[in-house]
Image (cartoon, rainbow, N blue to C red):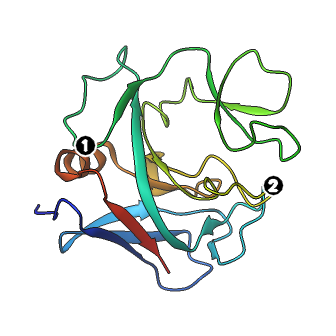
Amino acid sequence: MRIQPRGQLFVRALSRAATRGVLLAGGRPLPCALGRSGRRVIKREGDGATPSGTYALEAVFYRRDRALRPPTGLPLQVLTPTDGWCDEPTDRNYNRRIRHPYAASAEKMWRQDGLYDLIVVLDCNRKPRVRGRGSAIFIHLARPGLTPTEGCIALRRPDLLRLLAHLRRGARVHIP
């Protein structure tokens, strides 16, 4: 697979309501899962949709107790059992990484199901953050059968690892 260091990734799906699609990376199609509500231009917290737009790939998080350090040109951080991501629109840390225990609603990033063993954070609703416009939008590992996500993009482990090895700072994903 060849991916230009500053190239773009493209998501393709048959319709806006589709919960599966293809992530095109350097011309190579990688099957992916999308949100349970398909794709939406206007994303709302909890709507289950993958947001349409073009987003920078900010950083990679991984669980070193379950995986080796993945080779990538993106910034890399190790997940810990206290890591979370705030999904409470009224909280000052909405759509930011937090530490558990946390007083407001926040997703746990240290999951038992393995979906977040490897995560790429997208800059969706990050700068500026708009309360209620969606949080914790990631590229992460897929469930068996590529079942729908809560609004993220999910890839099979071998595909995500292969993709990460070719990504560099400045990489973006386009979701129509």
Q: Is residue 57 above or below residue 25?
A: above
Q: Please identify the quarter of the rendering in which residue 129 is found.
A: bottom right
Q: What residue is disc 2 on?
A: 131
The percent coordinates of residue 157 (x first, y second) are 31, 42
Is any atom of residue 24 visible in this view? no
Residue depicted at 24% across the width and 22% down the height:
68
- All told, the count of numbered labels is 2
* 28 left or right of 36 in image: left
Looking at the picture, how far across and down is residue 158, in whole percent?
Answer: 24, 45
- Furthest toward the bottom, the residue is 15
What secondary structure is marked by label 2? Answer: loop
Q: Position of residue 6 (x, y in %)?
A: 23, 63
Image-quadrant location for residue 59: top left
| First-in-chain label (1 vs 2) | 2
In this view, the residue in front, 16 or 62, is 62
**Of all residues shown, which one is farthest toward the right?**
90
Residue hosting label 1: 161
User: Mark 1: which secondary structure?
Assistant: helix
Quote the CA–CA distance across marks 1 and 2. 32 Å
